[in-house]
Image (tube, rainbow, N blue to C red):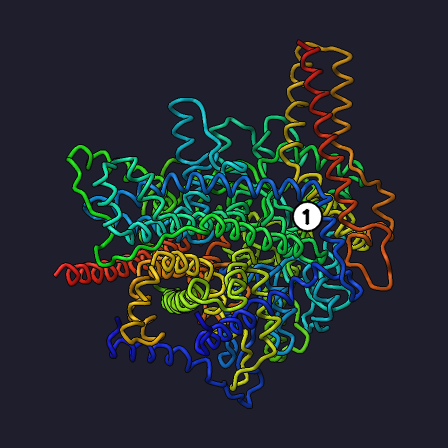
């Protein structure tokens, strides 16, 4: 039982916690509002550095940061339109596209000068003016040196290396449906190699996946732990893990894809002046230079900022090998955005066990055939490979607006010919059968080669 | 029995609370499951669900995992509960407290620690590989999920079973002994059947919780289960198809069916015993070798179930821990970082979880009373609605709250949804099923004759409840409070949506913020350890409190 004193204390505690929430900040006649509210998915090291720097420049404005996963951030903004936060600050352009489509962003023109329109074929700012790119990052391969050493694995350098049988069960990636930046990488590979060849590459690398993680940070986390040896990650995950002291390295493959990190002002922002000031600060030479600090490790979008770049930082504006190999077509990407995600999930993420055991059988058969060639077995293995690398959607279908629309939100006035659930079910059934068939073929090839 | 106005008023209040904070907000979100996109109502999405082999497979997997988890959780909980309640044991309270700790699995860090210990290249497998040349895939696939769920949720059974065992009338046992029963027979025929309400309450909770659990499969990247399928559908950016909500509806329906089945198992039997004050089962002293054997078994179980926490502790004091059996070196700097930056989270967590658990026990007791002691129409509905909260993903509840309460303004103009009290209510709603099951089980064991006696002596309904029912239920209510408090303290998914200000955030949010970067792993783990220690201490203290009261009341009874 509580004594009366204890009860009183409890009440006081509750009151003490209540009071600050009842306190209404009074607006001053100063130029900027008293605070700016930012919804971001960026790590603490990044948002704290900018919040601090901004507050010391504008001491009368407090930066209030709500750190949420991107999907929660979108839901939060969608549900809070009566009194919205000011700034949405995350990597994935798709998140901004969703908000833009729901009219939850407002156009913003920056006064910042010197930022080019495009980087490696990819537009830095939203062409419609709703969000601005403030940094770019490259995708690449991160690996745990202790892991590779213990398992005696060679260091991977290119995407194609990841297809090699030695890496079976050692590679991880996050699902493109869960990570907008992973999606861009997948899309770049598809655009670079072409639809059919691109998927074949992706499916063969997928044969070596240990797992497909649900969070993009799950991949660097697992590599840091040593749960898997190799991760397909964005560069700053690699750099910052290394800076923390983990036994990891990061390499850019020749065909790197550059992905932007963005910022945008939310429609009807309550503190528009402070919000503009914050965005301007991000894009200013000072804000851009801050990206180079080791715990942030991102690439500025302002070319002049690279004058102060630390050693070893690549310059995508000069170094033609980064990002330039692919001319990224945003229209193509946008059209098949949901389709690509759905295919990846159905053919790879949810059927990973079946897919990898199919590839394992193919690897075994190919190793056996190397020792003892057999024409019929080779043909069976080739067939198995074909089954494992062919996707049920043709390039033509992927470019067909009517087909891709099935995977977008159905508009009331535009009935779709088939429902997404039906098509996905067909893929799923087909995937299970194909992978099992491939495994069967490869296993019979092994028998022949014995 | 007649309906009294008091009962009707209580029922109406409860119904209003559940309607306002559970049914309406959640309904607003999951209505999509029945919508055809053009304003009409349709069941076509449900047909899609059953036509899709992936979902059928997911359903089967969830069912299998939940069933196996109940089995293994029982195997862990039974000896712990029985030994500590039945025998004189040094540190029985400590064992009971440690038995609760697994429920406090700090988000993210708990998972990292599990991977570092039991993962494919965790400590155990590295050692096995080094000395014996093989590894065990403990943390992979459905078996991994069963393993983690079992050691995470077995305290539900432990707590409720212990409370029930402690409530059994010693006279029953003595009668059986006089008739020659002893040992296993005594346990199987008398003790366990009398404690059945507690066991069933715990087992039902484990089953439903595991069936609906999202965190564990996600951490292990097992996606072919229902909860992750729903979650991935609901939270993927730009994905708006209704199947995620359909899965939520199906999970709710199935959880309620499981609950109904468990109620059926207890139906038509009498569990209440009349005599009170005996202080539960007679405690026996163990012979030294028996004591040693029992201790060894208990310690073994505790090591297994507490290993994630040992792992989190190592993470919090380790520098770098990567592909090695133990961290490379040790340091205190993570704790320093946490105390410099994040002390506000700690107070918030205690306040929110404490308030939420208190609300849960009050509501749980009220609903239990209405179900078992009155014949009000629709009293079972209250139970089912409250329990349905188990199957509602935190994300759905969070979105529902924002949608329903963001437009509602407090007198100072602040939206209700951003007021910290809404976090308390969200926790209370999400954890209510735990407290409710414990309260129902506790009341099951109180014989109605006690209340009738009080009423015959002239006590009114309210007095009877306050002076007779509540004290007799105290053990079960405490079990409910502890489970609610402990699990609310680490709730994540609704928290992430509803936190509107850093100053209002609880520990779970702090851990999330830290765990977004490689450098934050140590401080995140330190914050996790602080959460575990605080909540563990709270649990220990409440056990002490209840033990003391029980001791005193048994002294009085024996006087």
Q: Quadrant of the C terminus of chain A?
A: top right
The residue sitting at 55% across, 84% down in the picture is: B413
Q: Quadrant of residue B558?
A: bottom left
Residue A396 is at least partly visible in this image: yes
Residue B281: percent from the left, percent from the top?
Answer: 24, 48
Give the labeled residue for mark 1: A319
Q: In which quarter of the image is the N terminus of chain A?
A: bottom left
Seen in the image, is A53 located left or right of residue B550? right
Residue A58: percent from the left, percent from the top?
Answer: 52, 78
Residue B524: percent from the left, percent from the top?
Answer: 42, 55
Question: Mark 1 Cα within 10 Å, few/some/many (few <14, many 20+)?
Answer: few
Residue B344 is at least partly visible in this image: no
Seen in the image, is A332 located left or right of residue B340? right
Subunit of mark 1?
A: A
Foreground pick, A80 / B559 = B559
Q: In which quarter of the image is residue A254?
A: top right
Foreground pick, B344 / B196 = B196
Q: Work out whether A93 lies above or below B112.
A: below
The residue sitting at 47% across, 41% down in the picture is: B69
Seen in the image, is B111 located left or right of residue B328? right
Q: Work out whether B294 lies above or below B249.
A: above
Q: Work out whether A442 lies above or below B277.
A: above
Residue B266: percent from the left, percent from the top?
Answer: 44, 50
The residue sitting at 65% across, 67% down in the picture is: B28
- Furthest-left residue in this view: B559
The residue sitting at 30% across, 72% down in the picture is: B456
Q: Work out whether A68 lies above or below B83.
A: below
């Amino acid at each position: 039982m509580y004594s009366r004193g204890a009860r009183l204390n409890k009440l006081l505690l509750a009151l003490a916690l209540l009071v600050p929430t009842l306190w209404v900040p009074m607006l001053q006649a100063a130029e900027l509002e008293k605070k700016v509210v930012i919804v971001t998915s960026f790590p603490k090291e990044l948002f704290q550095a900018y919040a601090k720097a901004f507050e010391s420049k504008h001491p009368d404005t407090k930066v209030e940061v709500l750190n949420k996963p991107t999907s929660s951030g979108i839901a939060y903004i969608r549900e809070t339109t009566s009194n919205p936060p000011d700034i949405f600050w995350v990597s994935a352009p798709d998140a901004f596209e969703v908000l833009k489509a729901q009219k939850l962003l407002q156009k913003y023109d920056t006064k910042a000068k010197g930022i080019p329109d495009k980087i490696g074929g990819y537009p830095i700012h939203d062409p419609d003016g709703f969000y601005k790119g403030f940094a770019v990052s490259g995708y690449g391969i991160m690996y745990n040196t202790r892991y590779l050493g213990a398992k005696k694995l060679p260091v991977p350098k290119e995407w194609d290396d990841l297809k090699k049988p030695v890496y079976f069960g050692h590679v991880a990636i996050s699902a493109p449906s869960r990570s907008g930046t992973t999606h861009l990488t997948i899309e770049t590979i598809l655009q670079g190699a072409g639809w059919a060849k691109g998927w074949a590459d992706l499916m063969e690398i997928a044969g070596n996946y240990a797992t497909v993680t649900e969070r993009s940070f799950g991949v660097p986390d697992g590599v840091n732990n040593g749960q898997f040896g190799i991760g397909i990650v964005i560069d700053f995950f690699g750099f910052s893990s290394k800076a923390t002291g983990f036994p990891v390295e990061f390499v850019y493959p020749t065909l790197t894809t550059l992905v932007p990190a963005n910022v945008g002002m939310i429609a009807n922002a309550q503190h528009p002046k402070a919000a503009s000031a914050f965005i301007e600060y991000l894009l200013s030479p000072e804000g851009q230079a801050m990206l180079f600090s080791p715990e942030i490790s991102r690439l500025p979008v302002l070319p002049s900022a690279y004058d102060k770049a630390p050693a070893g930082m690549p310059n995508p504006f000069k170094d033609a090998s980064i990002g330039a190999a692919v001319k990224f077509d945003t229209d193509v990407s946008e059209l098949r955005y949901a389709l690509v995600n759905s295919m990846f999930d159905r053919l790879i993420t949810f059927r990973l066990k079946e897919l990898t055991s199919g590839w394992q059988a193919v690897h075994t058969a190919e190793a056996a055939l190397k020792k003892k060639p057999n024409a019929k077995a080779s043909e069976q293995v080739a067939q198995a490979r074909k089954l494992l690398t062919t996707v049920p959607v043709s390039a033509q279908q992927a470019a067909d607006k009517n087909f891709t629309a099935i995977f977008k939100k159905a508009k009331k006035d535009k009935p779709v010919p088939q429902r997404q659930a039906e098509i996905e079910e067909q893929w799923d059934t087909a995937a299970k059968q194909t992978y099992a068939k491939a495994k069967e073929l490869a296993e019979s090839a092994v028998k022949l080669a014995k | 029995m007649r309906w009294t106005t008091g009962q009707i008023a209580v029922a109406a209040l409860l119904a209003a609370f559940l309607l306002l904070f559970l049914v309406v907000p959640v309904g607003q979100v999951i209505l999509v499951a029945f919508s055809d996109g053009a304003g009409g109502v349709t069941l076509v999405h449900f047909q899609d669900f059953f036509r899709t082999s992936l979902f059928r497979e997911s359903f089967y997997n969830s069912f299998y995992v939940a069933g196996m988890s109940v089995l293994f959780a029982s195997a862990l909980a039974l000896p712990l509960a029985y030994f500590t309640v039945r025998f004189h044991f040094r540190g029985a309270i400590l064992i009971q407290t440690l038995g609760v700790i697994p429920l406090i699995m700090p988000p993210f860090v708990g998972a990292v620690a599990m991977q570092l210990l039991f993962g494919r290249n965790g400590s155990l497998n590295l050692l096995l590989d080094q000395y014996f040349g093989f590894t065990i895939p403990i943390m992979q696939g459905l078996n991994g999920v069963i393993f983690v769920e079992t050691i995470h949720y077995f305290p539900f059974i432990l707590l409720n079973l212990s409370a029930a065992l402690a409530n059994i009338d010693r006279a029953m046992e003595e009668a059986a002994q006089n008739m020659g029963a002893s040992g296993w027979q005594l346990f199987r025929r008398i003790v366990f059947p009398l404690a059945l309400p507690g066991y069933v309450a715990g087992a039902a909770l484990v089953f439903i919780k595991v069936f609906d659990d999202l965190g564990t499969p996600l951490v292990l990247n097992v996606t072919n289960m229902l909860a992750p399928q729903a979650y991935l559908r609901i939270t993927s950016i730009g994905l708006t198809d209704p199947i995620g909500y359909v899965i939520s509806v199906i999970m709710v329906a199935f959880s309620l069916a499981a609950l109904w089945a468990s109620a059926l198992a207890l139906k038509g039997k009498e569990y209440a015993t009349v005599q009170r004050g005996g202080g539960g089962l007679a405690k026996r002293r163990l012979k030294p070798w028996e004591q040693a054997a029992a201790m060894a078994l208990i310690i073994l179980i505790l090591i297994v179930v507490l290993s994630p926490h040992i792992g989190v502790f190592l993470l919090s004091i380790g520098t770098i821990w990567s592909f090695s059996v133990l961290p490379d070196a040790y340091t205190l700097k993570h704790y320093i970082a946490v105390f410099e930056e994040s002390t506000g989270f700690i107070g918030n967590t205690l306040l929110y979880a404490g308030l939420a658990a208190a609300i849960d026990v009050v509501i749980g007791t009220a609903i239990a009373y209405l179900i078992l002691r009155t014949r009000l129409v629709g009293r079972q509905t209250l139970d089912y609605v409250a329990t349905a909260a188990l199957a509602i993903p935190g994300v759905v509840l969070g979105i529902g709250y924002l949608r329903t309460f963001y437009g509602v303004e407090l007198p100072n103009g602040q939206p209700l949804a951003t007021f910290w009290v809404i976090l308390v209510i969200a926790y209370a709603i999400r954890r209510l099923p735990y407290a409710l099951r414990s309260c129902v089980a506790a009341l099951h064991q109180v014989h109605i004759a006690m209340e009738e006696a009080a009423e015959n002596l002239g006590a009114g309904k309210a007095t009877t409840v306050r002076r007779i029912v509540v004290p007799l239920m105290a053990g079960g209510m405490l079990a409910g409070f502890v489970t609610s408090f402990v699990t609310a303290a680490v709730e994540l998914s609704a928290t992430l949506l509803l936190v509107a200000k850093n100053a209002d955030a609880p520990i779970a949010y702090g851990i999330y913020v830290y765990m977004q970067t490689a450098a934050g792993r140590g401080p995140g783990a330190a914050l996790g350890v602080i959460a575990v220690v605080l909540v563990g201490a709270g649990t220990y203290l409440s056990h002490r409190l209840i033990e003391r009261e029980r001791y005193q009341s048994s002294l009085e009874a024996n006087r």
